[in-house]
Amino acid sequence: METDPNKIRKLSKEREDENWKFRSFLKGCDISEEEIDSIVHRLYWQVSSEIDCKTCANCCKEVQPVLDEEDIENFSRCLGISVAQFKDQYLVKSEELETFAFSKKPCPFLKDNLCSHYTCRPKDCVSYPHIHKSGFIFRLINIIENYSICPIVFNVYEHLKDEIWHRGDFDSFNDFNWGE
């Protein structure tokens, strides 16, 4: 189990081509999306039970979560400031998506690898790294982006590669038409 964010970042660069090929394989293989979700969810619970996010907090250092109006109202209420002040002081607006994200990295509320306002954190933070959700194969670009950031995502994706190869799909993985 790899948990060092620096080593994960390095391995992510080394395995970039392999990860994109595996993504293509998952999109085109004959394993149902429900079966892939089932495998991923089981791996997620196994891996996440062995990793203490508080020793890493790399997501809070590298990811800019999306905040909706409910998140903004809740967070500003927790801070005891107006929504307008919260937006001005902590957020940036994405013009094309009409959404908000924290304006700085790392998150301005990260203190000693802990969220200083944990009970108020946005829904995007609560559900990170989003692997427990259904539709894994439809979110693979985000999974690959988070692979270099989150030890849970890294290890789940690596275990998923191993598990599918061990099922006997290794030959079809190597013989898969990669569009080259």
Image (cartoon, rainbow, N blue to C red):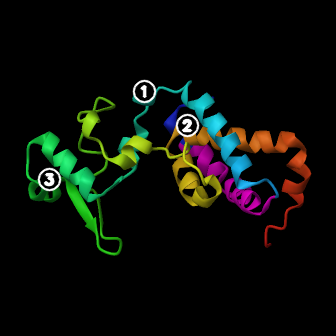
Tell me the CA gap for discs 3 and 1. Answer: 28 Å
Q: CA distance from mark 2 to mark 1?
A: 12 Å
Secondary structure state at the residue bearing disc 1: helix
Residue labelled with disc 3 = 86
The tag earlier along the polypeptide, 2 or 1, is 1
Question: Disc 2 marks which residue?
Answer: 152
Q: Is most of the magenta stretch helix, strand or loop?
A: helix
| The quarter of the displayed image where residue 91 is located | bottom left
Residue shown at 40% from the left, 28% from the top: 54
Q: Is residue 36 magenta?
A: no
Residue 110, visible in the rendered structure: no
> How far across and how far down the image is residue 19, in percent?
68, 54
Quote the CA–CA distance across marks 2 and 3: 31 Å
Image coordinates of residue 117 in percent, x first then y, are 23, 36
* Coordinates of residue 23 in the picture (x, y in percent): 69, 58
Q: Quadrant of the N terminus?
A: top right
Query: Looking at the image, which residue is at 65% across and 44% down?
Result: 157
Q: Alpha-carbon neighbours of circle 1 within 10 Å: few (<14), some, or many (≥20)? A: few
Q: Secondary structure at mark 2?
A: helix
Query: Closest to the observer: 22 or 136?
Result: 136
Q: Which residues are magenta?
A: 9-29
Residue at which label 1 appears? 55
Tag 3: amino acid: Phe
Mark 2 vs mark 1: give the one in front: 2
Task: Give the SS element for disc 3.
Answer: helix
Q: Nearer the viewer, mark 3 or mark 1?
A: 3
Tag 2: amino acid:
Ile
The amino acid pointed to by label 1 is Thr
N-terminal-most mark, 3 or 1: 1
Placement of 86 over or under 53, stated as above or below: below
